[in-house]
Amino acid sequence: MNSRPPSRIHVRLPGQPSSGNDRRRLLLLGAAVLVALLLAGLLGFWLGRSAGGTGGQQQDHGARAERLQQELVELRQRQATLEASDRISRAANTEVQASLAERDEEIAGLRADVAFYERLVGATSQRKGLNTHAIEFRQEAAGTYQYSVVLTQNLNRGAISQGQMRFTVEGVKNGRLATVSWDELHQRTGVPGQEYSFRYFQQLSGSVILPADFTPQRVRVTLGSGTGGSTQVFDWKLAGVPAANGE
């Protein structure tokens, strides 16, 4: 029968140096603690830096958003200003076009007046003082007559002729000679003459009514002023112009 060898018990008294294995364990433990502390420090530094970087980016984004918002407001204000300026320009252009059209009409009228006056004062025209150059009548649908009287003077180019124009119509009524007065032509009493005031010529117009049973033959035009007047007689056949529809 084999007997087991007796076990060995080592007793280390206080102050006795430890074995090599214990020293290695202590060294490894210390190294592990140092590595853990180092890693913890690095992790804290990294987290703090990351947090600081995120805050800076947020500040940059906020400042950029404010700049973009301000630029947007400025662009909208500029657009509103340009739109208002465009409306003003369009309105001014419309007004200018209307004014040009009016000036064109005035120029055309002045050219017609000049052409008419040149015929009056041409080299072959006779020099005359206050004068009834022409009178025309046009019958209207309502039974009235539209008249047009042209007054001229080319004797004194610097003088202004002023006064009143009246005319009467002579003809036949009920087989007898009759005259329709200025008042009767207007079917009123005390009708004043038609005022005129011109340097070279003027056109007067209006409407009158002839009696239904009256046949016109002549028109007697009287021009009056404070210093006197003149009377001219025109043949109705030359003065009377039928309406365009033949009435």
Image (cartoon, rainbow, N blue to C red):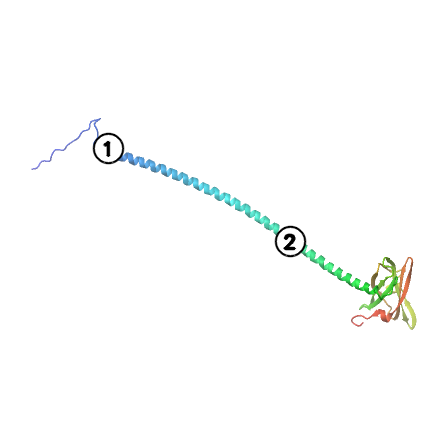
Residue 177 picture quarter: bottom right
Q: Is residue 202 left or right of residue 39?
A: right
Circle 2 sits on which residue? 87
Q: Which residue is mark 1?
A: 23
Residue 33's place in the image compared with 107, above or below, is above
Name the amino acid type tagged 1. Answer: Arg
Looking at the rendered structure, which numbered label has been put on residue 72?
none
Q: Residue at x 28, y 34 (%)?
A: 30
- Give the mark nearer the N terminus: 2 vs 1: 1
How much space separates mark 2 and mark 1, taking CA atoms? 96 Å
Tag 2 and tag 1, C-beta contact below 8 Å:
no
Label 1 secondary element: helix
Residue farthest to the bottom, as pictured: 175
Give above or below for 23 relative to 99.
above
**Tag 2, which secondary structure?**
helix
Vertical relation: 225 (above or below) 139:
above
Pick the front one: 241 or 101: 101
Q: Residue at 91% of width from left, 61% of height from top?
A: 229
**Image quadrant occupied by the C terminus:** bottom right
Q: Name the kind of residue labelled 2 in the image.
A: Arg
What's the residue at 50%, 45% (across, down)?
Answer: 64
Q: Residue 181 appears at what percent x and percent y?
A: 90, 65
